[in-house]
Image (spheres, rainbow, N blue to C red):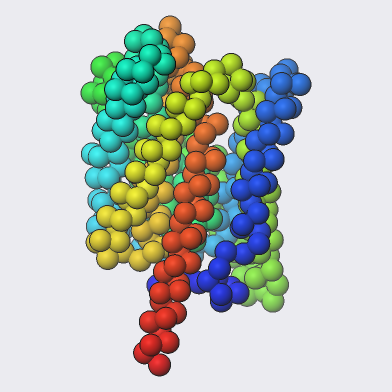
Amino acid sequence: MVHRRKNGSGRLDTKTMLFPLFVVIAIALGLLLGTRTPSLSGPLSDYGIPVGIFFMIYPAMTRIRLEELGKSLRDIRTISLMVILNYAIAPFLVAGLAYFFFFMVFYHLGLLSFAVTTQVFVGIILLGVAPCIAMVMVWTNLAHGNISKAVSFVAWNSLIQVATTPMLVYVLARTSVTISPGLILESVLLYLALPLVAGIATRKLLQGKAYFSRILNMMGTLQTIALLFTILVIFWSQGSGIIAYPSLVWMVAIVMLTFYFALFQMGYLVARKARYSYSDSTAIGFTVSARDFEVSIAIAVAAFSSYPYVVVTTAIGPLLEIPLMLFLVWVQLGRETRLSETWRLAEVSKA
């Protein structure tokens, strides 16, 4: 069933409509602070980003019911669909789109040299091989998707990508790499286990209280503030890449927007065709489209340190990912509104 707005109108509320403006302000402020205080970039990246992501994910976890999470973890049919889309299709689709844009368009037009084109192509491949194991829960929650499904996908992906990522990098980039299980474990602990435990504990303590619904609304506000804070910190600490490589940024942005949109639509529409609900299909769509930029950057630094544009491309990735994924959230909220209106008209016609 389609999740309807609390106001019952099916329209996007004022806060949702104004949110893109706040995102633009956070990006601009982050870039400005990054140019004025570059010495703070290291501490901000080390501490600010993990704190911001934690408080983005934690509010979503307060909405999880353990029985629903247990069912999602055991839902073999849905997990199998997610695995096929995420590992058998998504990396190759990303590589194909990257090849088309960088070799057949940008290089052909003389915008990049062959050496730079090759390095950027590898960087895009690295961004495409590993599915996200953190932020996907935030996007799913913001778009009113099934957060229990998203958590189960993250849990499975954290195990699967340790084995599949080196293989995919070798097949697509012809380079042998190893993935440190410690890197994956750290992300799982920080961005899945701790927020999940905190969210479940919060729900257990407060559920049934008269003010519980108000607490959930406050959690939504906390998530919004944490998201804006994370955007500001990312652009503050890493936005120098945009200033140093402005022409490369817009080229990478075109490719990322294309593959994020294509991957999301593929996941969502395939799930809908398989008769999944809006909320379940939304969780699948964001799981297929969101990428693990922490793993991408780690591989670039470890295996491609002598190729600077590979590293730069993977560093540009997280700068663009949040705005692009917020665009998909916006698209999905509009889709939910239309589905809600269609459902309402169908109910009226039955009456």
Q: Which residue lies furthest to the top in this view?
A: 306
Residue drawn at (34%, 54%), measured in percent from left and top? Answer: 268
Q: Can residue 277 be seen in this view?
A: yes
Q: Which residue lies furthest to the right in this view?
A: 36
Q: Residue furthest bottom?
A: 351
Q: Position of residue 217 (x, y in %)?
A: 66, 64
Residue 132 to residue 300: above or below: below
Residue 85 to residue 100: above or below: below
Q: Toward which corner of the image does residue 169 lie, by quadrant?
A: top left
Q: In this view, does 142 lie to the left or right of 116?
A: right
Which is nearer the eye, 148 or 5?
A: 5
Q: Position of residue 144 (x, y in %)?
A: 49, 61
Q: Position of residue 118 (x, y in %)?
A: 34, 14
Q: Quadrant of the C terminus?
A: bottom left
Q: Quadrant of the N terminus?
A: bottom left
Residue drawn at (27%, 45%), measured in percent from left and top? Answer: 85
Residue 241 to residue 255: above or below: above
Residue drawn at (72%, 27%), measured in percent from left and top? Answer: 32
Marker count (numbered): 0
Residue drawn at (37%, 61%), measured in percent from left and top? Answer: 280
Which is nearer the eye, 286 or 25?
A: 25
Residue 141 to residue 103: above or below: below
Which is nearer the eye, 343 or 43?
A: 343
